[in-house]
Amino acid sequence: MVSKLRAIIAYLSYSGNTEEVAELMESKLKREGISVDMHRIGIDAPFDPESYDFVFLGTFTWEMGSTPDEVKDLILEIGYKPNNIAVFGTGDTQFGGDDLFCKAVDKLVRFYDSKWTALKIEQSPRGSQEEKVELWLEGVLHHAKSYA
Ligand SMILES: Cc1cc2nc3c(=O)[nH]c(=O)nc-3n(C[C@H](O)[C@H](O)[C@H](O)COP(=O)(O)O)c2cc1C
Protein backbone atom coordinates (compact mmCIF):
# COMPACT_ATOMS: atom_id res chain seq x y z
CA MET A 1 0.00 0.00 0.00
CA VAL A 2 1.29 3.46 -0.88
CA SER A 3 0.99 5.76 2.13
CA LYS A 4 -0.41 9.26 1.70
CA LEU A 5 1.90 12.26 1.71
CA ARG A 6 1.50 14.27 4.90
CA ALA A 7 1.54 18.04 5.32
CA ILE A 8 1.09 20.41 8.22
CA ILE A 9 0.09 24.04 7.80
CA ALA A 10 1.38 26.06 10.76
CA TYR A 11 0.19 29.63 10.66
CA LEU A 12 -0.24 32.78 12.69
CA SER A 13 -3.09 35.15 11.92
CA TYR A 14 -4.59 37.99 13.91
CA SER A 15 -7.14 39.44 11.53
CA GLY A 16 -7.78 36.38 9.35
CA ASN A 17 -5.86 36.99 6.10
CA THR A 18 -3.12 34.42 6.72
CA GLU A 19 -5.73 32.01 8.02
CA GLU A 20 -7.66 32.37 4.74
CA VAL A 21 -4.52 31.48 2.80
CA ALA A 22 -3.97 28.50 5.10
CA GLU A 23 -7.53 27.31 4.51
CA LEU A 24 -7.24 27.64 0.73
CA MET A 25 -4.04 25.63 0.90
CA GLU A 26 -5.70 23.00 3.07
CA SER A 27 -8.48 22.41 0.54
CA LYS A 28 -6.10 22.33 -2.42
CA LEU A 29 -3.75 19.86 -0.70
CA LYS A 30 -6.67 17.63 0.25
CA ARG A 31 -7.89 17.71 -3.34
CA GLU A 32 -4.41 16.50 -4.32
CA GLY A 33 -4.86 13.52 -1.96
CA ILE A 34 -2.47 14.80 0.69
CA SER A 35 -3.27 14.39 4.37
CA VAL A 36 -3.25 17.79 6.12
CA ASP A 37 -2.99 18.88 9.75
CA MET A 38 -3.60 22.48 10.73
CA HIS A 39 -1.50 24.11 13.46
CA ARG A 40 -2.39 27.48 14.98
CA ILE A 41 0.90 28.94 16.11
CA GLY A 42 0.86 29.95 19.76
CA ILE A 43 -2.30 27.95 20.44
CA ASP A 44 -1.89 24.32 19.42
CA ALA A 45 0.40 21.71 21.00
CA PRO A 46 3.94 21.40 19.53
CA PHE A 47 4.41 19.22 16.45
CA ASP A 48 7.33 17.23 15.07
CA PRO A 49 8.36 18.46 11.59
CA GLU A 50 9.84 15.01 10.89
CA SER A 51 6.35 13.50 10.96
CA TYR A 52 5.52 15.39 7.76
CA ASP A 53 6.62 15.48 4.13
CA PHE A 54 5.84 19.21 4.01
CA VAL A 55 5.73 21.87 6.71
CA PHE A 56 3.97 25.00 5.42
CA LEU A 57 4.84 27.89 7.68
CA GLY A 58 2.68 30.99 7.40
CA THR A 59 2.87 34.42 9.00
CA PHE A 60 1.88 38.01 8.56
CA THR A 61 4.49 40.79 8.86
CA TRP A 62 4.43 43.20 11.75
CA GLU A 63 5.90 46.57 12.78
CA MET A 64 8.39 47.73 10.13
CA GLY A 65 8.99 44.30 8.64
CA SER A 66 9.13 42.35 11.90
CA THR A 67 8.40 38.69 12.46
CA PRO A 68 5.71 38.23 15.14
CA ASP A 69 6.94 36.91 18.51
CA GLU A 70 4.72 33.83 18.33
CA VAL A 71 6.53 32.76 15.15
CA LYS A 72 9.93 33.37 16.76
CA ASP A 73 8.80 31.20 19.69
CA LEU A 74 7.82 28.43 17.28
CA ILE A 75 11.26 28.61 15.65
CA LEU A 76 12.88 28.17 19.06
CA GLU A 77 10.48 25.37 19.92
CA ILE A 78 11.39 23.51 16.71
CA GLY A 79 15.02 24.04 17.62
CA TYR A 80 16.69 23.06 14.34
CA LYS A 81 16.31 23.79 10.62
CA PRO A 82 14.16 21.12 8.97
CA ASN A 83 14.63 20.89 5.19
CA ASN A 84 10.93 20.46 4.41
CA ILE A 85 9.70 23.97 5.24
CA ALA A 86 7.87 26.07 2.65
CA VAL A 87 7.01 29.60 3.72
CA PHE A 88 3.97 31.71 2.95
CA GLY A 89 2.46 34.87 4.34
CA THR A 90 0.37 37.96 3.97
CA GLY A 91 1.28 41.62 4.21
CA ASP A 92 0.27 45.03 3.02
CA THR A 93 2.35 47.29 0.78
CA GLN A 94 0.77 50.31 2.49
CA PHE A 95 3.10 49.60 5.43
CA GLY A 96 6.46 50.59 3.99
CA GLY A 97 6.07 49.64 0.34
CA ASP A 98 7.89 46.84 -1.47
CA ASP A 99 10.90 46.88 0.86
CA LEU A 100 8.88 45.84 3.90
CA PHE A 101 6.16 43.86 2.13
CA CYS A 102 6.00 40.38 3.70
CA LYS A 103 9.49 40.87 5.06
CA ALA A 104 8.94 38.26 7.81
CA VAL A 105 8.36 35.73 5.03
CA ASP A 106 11.65 36.64 3.33
CA LYS A 107 13.49 36.30 6.64
CA LEU A 108 12.03 32.85 7.26
CA VAL A 109 12.97 31.63 3.78
CA ARG A 110 16.56 32.75 4.41
CA PHE A 111 16.68 31.34 7.92
CA TYR A 112 15.47 27.90 6.86
CA ASP A 113 17.27 28.05 3.51
CA SER A 114 13.98 26.86 2.05
CA LYS A 115 14.02 24.89 -1.19
CA TRP A 116 10.97 26.81 -2.31
CA THR A 117 10.39 30.45 -3.10
CA ALA A 118 7.88 32.07 -0.78
CA LEU A 119 4.22 32.77 -1.39
CA LYS A 120 3.36 36.39 -0.58
CA ILE A 121 -0.22 37.58 -0.59
CA GLU A 122 -1.43 41.14 -0.28
CA GLN A 123 -4.08 41.14 2.47
CA SER A 124 -6.90 38.64 1.79
CA PRO A 125 -6.29 35.95 -0.83
CA ARG A 126 -9.95 35.86 -1.85
CA GLY A 127 -10.59 36.74 -5.47
CA SER A 128 -7.79 37.22 -7.96
CA GLN A 129 -5.03 35.97 -5.64
CA GLU A 130 -6.62 32.55 -5.09
CA GLU A 131 -5.02 31.35 -8.31
CA LYS A 132 -1.63 32.51 -7.04
CA VAL A 133 -2.05 30.25 -3.99
CA GLU A 134 -2.97 27.27 -6.19
CA LEU A 135 -0.09 27.80 -8.63
CA TRP A 136 2.43 28.20 -5.82
CA LEU A 137 1.29 24.95 -4.20
CA GLU A 138 1.48 23.13 -7.52
CA GLY A 139 5.04 24.42 -7.86
CA VAL A 140 6.00 23.14 -4.40
CA LEU A 141 4.45 19.72 -5.03
CA HIS A 142 5.97 19.41 -8.51
CA HIS A 143 9.43 20.38 -7.24
CA ALA A 144 9.12 17.86 -4.41
CA LYS A 145 8.21 15.08 -6.86
CA SER A 146 11.11 15.88 -9.16
CA TYR A 147 13.52 15.51 -6.21
CA ALA A 148 11.85 12.37 -4.81
C1 LIG B 1 0.79 47.80 12.97
C2 LIG B 1 0.91 47.02 11.69
C3 LIG B 1 2.13 46.94 11.05
C4 LIG B 1 2.26 46.27 9.83
N1 LIG B 1 3.48 46.21 9.21
C5 LIG B 1 3.60 45.55 8.02
C6 LIG B 1 4.87 45.47 7.36
O1 LIG B 1 5.91 45.97 7.82
N2 LIG B 1 4.92 44.80 6.17
C7 LIG B 1 3.83 44.21 5.61
O2 LIG B 1 3.94 43.63 4.54
N3 LIG B 1 2.61 44.29 6.22
C8 LIG B 1 2.48 44.92 7.40
N4 LIG B 1 1.26 44.98 8.03
C9 LIG B 1 0.07 44.38 7.36
C10 LIG B 1 -0.27 42.96 7.83
O3 LIG B 1 0.84 42.10 7.73
C11 LIG B 1 -1.41 42.44 6.95
O4 LIG B 1 -2.57 43.18 7.19
C12 LIG B 1 -1.66 40.95 7.16
O5 LIG B 1 -2.45 40.47 6.10
C13 LIG B 1 -2.34 40.64 8.48
O6 LIG B 1 -2.44 39.24 8.57
P1 LIG B 1 -3.57 38.51 9.41
O7 LIG B 1 -4.92 39.00 8.86
O8 LIG B 1 -3.36 37.06 9.13
O9 LIG B 1 -3.38 38.85 10.84
C14 LIG B 1 1.11 45.66 9.25
C15 LIG B 1 -0.12 45.73 9.90
C16 LIG B 1 -0.24 46.40 11.10
C17 LIG B 1 -1.58 46.47 11.77
Image (tube, rainbow, N blue to C red):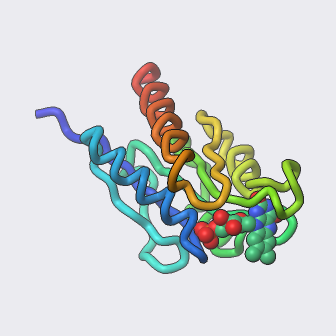
Quarter of the figure that contains the C terminus: top left
Q: Is residue 66 visible?
A: no
Q: In this view, does 112 lie above or below 68?
A: above
Residue drawn 74% across and 48% down? 106
Q: In this view, does 6 lie above or below 47?
A: above
Residue drawn 40% across and 25% down? 145
Query: Which residue is outermost to the front?
Result: 127
Nearer to us in this view, 12 or 81: 12
Q: In the image, residue 80 lies at what x, y percent?
A: 60, 54
Tell me which image quadrant ligand 1 sits in.
Answer: bottom right
Horizontal arrangement in the rendering, residue 89 relative to residue 102 (left or right): left
Quarter-of-image position of residue 28: top left
Residue drawn 48% across and 80% down? 43
Q: Is residue 11 visible?
A: yes
Nearer to us in this view, 134 or 142: 134
Horizontal arrangement in the rendering, residue 31 relative to residue 72 (left or right): left
Query: Which residue is outermost to the top?
Result: 146
Number of numbered discs overlaid on the protein picture: 0
Query: Which residue is outermost to the left?
Result: 1
Horizontal arrangement in the rendering, residue 100 relative to residue 6 (left or right): right
Quarter-of-image position of residue 61: bottom right
Q: In the image, residue 87 lies at what x, y percent?
A: 59, 48
Quarter of the figure that contains the N terminus: top left
Q: In the image, residue 26 lies at what x, y percent?
A: 37, 53
Horizontal arrangement in the rendering, residue 23 relative to residue 99 (left or right): left
Nearer to us in this view, 92 or 110: 92
Nearer to us in this view, 45 or 143: 143
Q: In the image, residue 114 lies at what x, y percent?
A: 63, 40
Residue drawn 28% across and 49% down? 35
